[in-house]
């Protein structure tokens, strides 16, 4: 008899709990016969950890948690479910940094992928062919540190590096480098994937490409990534990290679009920016400029001036837009970098006197969010609910989004957390991948990264719903990033023209619908 305490919060309702006694486990007996039993845990600590995620909005209990010590262990687990008359669901969990239960497996098995860390070195750099082979469980920070030992680095990043390779490739992996190199899924040469049939397949653009493209941004639906081969390039040593402030949204976005349009030359050398993002400073953030995205960037004096800029804003609006860019350099370019930047900034229309520059190491730049995380952890403000909403908004509607959502819905309400806005190019995304983006050449990534208290996350959820309702009403053809939907028709709408292919791929690679049930697409 297994007693399962089930705490399941259906979105929009507060977490409710009920206790259910089951007379038999959904896990088949042959699982215990395999050499797997000692890697399965039903210990309450393990179950509780696997029932929660970074979002703290949803809880869902698995029957057991699996701690693999090899690729083979995972293959055996999936085979065991696939061959059972009562297949059980399986979710690979990276760091559980999803916000809506995407890495959970209600009544199934959660695989703690990080347990593969105990089976030797799983980051191998090829200096001749410029790639790194990494386990799906590896954190990007560890990939960065390992490749830097050879003077090399991946090209495309997320803002925060304590995420797993398998987790970000299941979504896309975006940041201020996406306009230049595409998302992380566009920088993968090859993968080892365990499909929902329990078969290990090596795939790439040219070999088993259907699986390869399916898995890229495939929300964990087609297979478990156990190895990814990621493209590398020579690493720079230093970074000029610059923020410029604006109080006019159209000028801010015009300058962002100008900066991403500066092309590489014929030798592949980048003469434009290496990173372009942007964010909003709303009222509340002005009083806490040192949120986890801004931590330690501004001095106290800068901070006072920024507040005065906000209050001087002619009474029009107290939103300040912050254009954030970076340009990499090294010993060879140390004497020319300032001149280069001056040329790049020529013609930009930021508010005079409001350009702030920092000179940091490449690692410190890429790992910038970590400092803010540690500060919030100390204050007990990291482990709180995160009712996040991430959208891709077509360029043609971004100004309306600014006036109706940033000034309208958010302006009227409370706002608590970073709000990111930056443009990227559709042609940097491979159309064959599962990830979906708007149908316009330039679109904006908008991240509403709210944090809430334990009791007011529903307030922000309602605000998110209002934003989505507004977009639907006026016909803004956005796509959710890190998507979450409640109904099948919403998923069909999300995938649009890709839905039939997505379904076909599911039938091909996970016909028993075993994998990543927490995405709630097929179950
Ligand atoms: P999990 O949340 O554990 O898993 C996510 C999904 O992937 C689940 O469906 C899971 O089943 C599946 N999965 C996990 N591992 C594997 C695997 N090996 N094979 C197949 N499927 C797998 N995203 C960005 O793109 N850019 C950012 O800048 C960014 N910043 C972030 C900052 C913070 C502080 C946080 C919390 C998240 C951020 N994210 C960002 C979102 C992040 O990419 C997602 O949370 C992503 O899911 C990675 O988290 P994870 O590794 O913990 O994956």
Image (cartoon, rainbow, N blue to C red):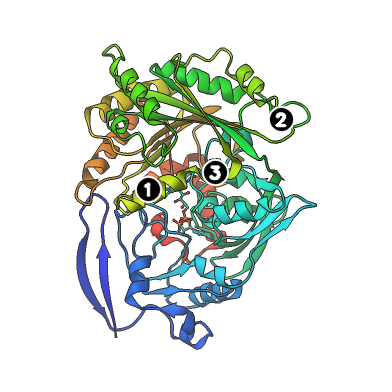
What is the quadrant of residue 45 in the picture? bottom left
Residue 430 in the figure: left or right of residue 388 = right
In space, the residues marked 1 and 2 are separated at their CA atoms by 34 Å
Q: Please rate how many residues cluster around mark 2, counting C-alpha atoms within 10 Å: few if below 14, some from 14 to 19, many from 20.
A: few
- Name the quadrant of the N terminus: bottom left
Q: Which of marks 1 and 3 is nearer the N terminus?
A: 3
User: Mark 2 sits on what residue?
Assistant: 333
N-terminal of the two: label 1 or label 2? 2
Neighbor class of circle 3 (other Cα within 10 Å; few <14, some 14-19, many 20+) is some
Q: 352 or 417, which lies in front? A: 352
Q: Where is residue 342 in the image (x, y as percent from the top left)?
A: 61, 18
Mark earlier in primary sequence (3, 2): 2
Instruction: Please name the residue shown 54% across and 43% down the image.
Output: 364
Q: Is residue 267 rendered to the left or right of residue 279?
A: right
Q: Residue furthest bottom?
A: 33
Q: Relative to 333, does residue 375 appear above or below in the rendering?
A: below
Residue 271 coordinates in the image, percent (x, y)? 68, 26
Considering only vertical position in the picture, is 35 above or below 15? below
Q: How far apart are marks 3 and 2 (CA)?
A: 19 Å
Splitting the image into 4 quarters, where does residue 267 fall?
top right
Task: Give the numbered dot on residue 375.
Answer: 1
SS type, badge 2: loop
Quadrant in the picture for residue 4: bottom left
Q: Is residue 144 visible?
A: yes
Q: Mark 3 points at which residue?
A: 364
Label 3: element kind: helix
The percent coordinates of residue 192 (x first, y second) are: 64, 62
Disc 2: residue Cβ within 8 A of ligand 1's nearest atom = no
């Amino acid at each position: 008899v297994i007693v399962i305490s089930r705490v399941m919060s259906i979105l929009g309702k507060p977490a409710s709990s009920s206790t259910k006694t089951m007379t038999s486990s959904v896990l088949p007996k042959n699982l215990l016969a395999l050499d797997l039993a000692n890697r399965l845990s039903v210990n309450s600590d393990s179950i509780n950890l696997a029932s929660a995620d970074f979002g703290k909005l949803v809880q869902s209990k698995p029957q057991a948690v699996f701690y693999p010590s090899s690729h083979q262990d995972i293959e055996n687990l999936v085979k065991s479910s696939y061959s059972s008359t009562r297949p059980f669901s399986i979710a690979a969990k990276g760091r559980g940094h999803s916000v809506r239960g995407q890495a959970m497996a209600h009544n199934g098995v959660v695989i703690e992928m990080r347990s593969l860390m105990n089976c030797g070195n799983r980051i191998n750099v090829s200096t001749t062919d410029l790639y790194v082979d990494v386990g799906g469980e590896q954190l990007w920070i560890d990939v960065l540190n390992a490749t830097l030992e050879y003077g090399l680095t991946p090209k495309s990043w997320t803002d925060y590096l304590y995420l797993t390779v398998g987790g970000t490739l299941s979504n896309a992996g975006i940041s201020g480098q996406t306009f230049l190199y595409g998302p992380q899924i566009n920088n993968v040469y090859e993968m080892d994937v365990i499909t929902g049939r329990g078969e290990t397949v090596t795939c790439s653009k040219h070999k088993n490409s259907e699986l390869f493209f399916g898995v890229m941004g495939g929300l964990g639906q087609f297979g478990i990534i156990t190895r990814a081969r990621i493209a590398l390039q020579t690493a720079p040593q230093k970074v000029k990290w610059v923020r410029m402030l604006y109080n006019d949204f159209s000028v801010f976005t015009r300058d962002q679009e100008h900066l991403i349009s500066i092309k590489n030359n014929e030798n592949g050398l980048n003469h434009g920016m290496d990173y372009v993002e942007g964010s909003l400073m709303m009222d509340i953030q002005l009083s806490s400029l040192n949120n986890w995205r801004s931590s330690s960037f501004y001095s106290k004096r800068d901070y006072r001036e920024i507040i005065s800029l906000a209050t001087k804003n002619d009474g029009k609006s107290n939103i300040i837009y912050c254009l954030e860019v970076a340009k990499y350099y090294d010993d060879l370019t140390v004497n020319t970098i300032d001149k280069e930047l001056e040329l790049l900034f020529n013609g930009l229309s930021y508010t005079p006197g409001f350009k702030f520059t920092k000179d940091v190491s490449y690692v410190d730049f890429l790992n910038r969010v970590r400092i803010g995380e540690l500060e919030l952890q100390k204050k007990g403000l990291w482990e709180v609910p995160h009712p996040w909403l991430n959208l891709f908004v077509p360029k043609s509607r971004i100004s309306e989004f600014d006036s109706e959502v940033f000034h309208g819905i958010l302006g009227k309400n409370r706002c608590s957390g970073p709000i990111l806005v930056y443009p990227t190019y559709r042609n940097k995304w491979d159309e064959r991948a599962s990830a979906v983006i708007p149908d316009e050449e330039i679109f904006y990534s908008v991240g509403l990264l709210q944090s809430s208290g334990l009791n007011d996350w529903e307030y922000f959820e309602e605000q998110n719903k209002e934003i989505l309702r507004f977009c639907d009403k006026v016909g803004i053809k956005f796509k959710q990033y890190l998507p979450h939907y409640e109904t099948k028709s919403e998923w069909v709408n999300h995938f649009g023209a890709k839905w039939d292919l997505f379904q076909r791929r599911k039938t091909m690679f996970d016909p028993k619908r075993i994998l990543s049930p927490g995405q709630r697409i097929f179950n």
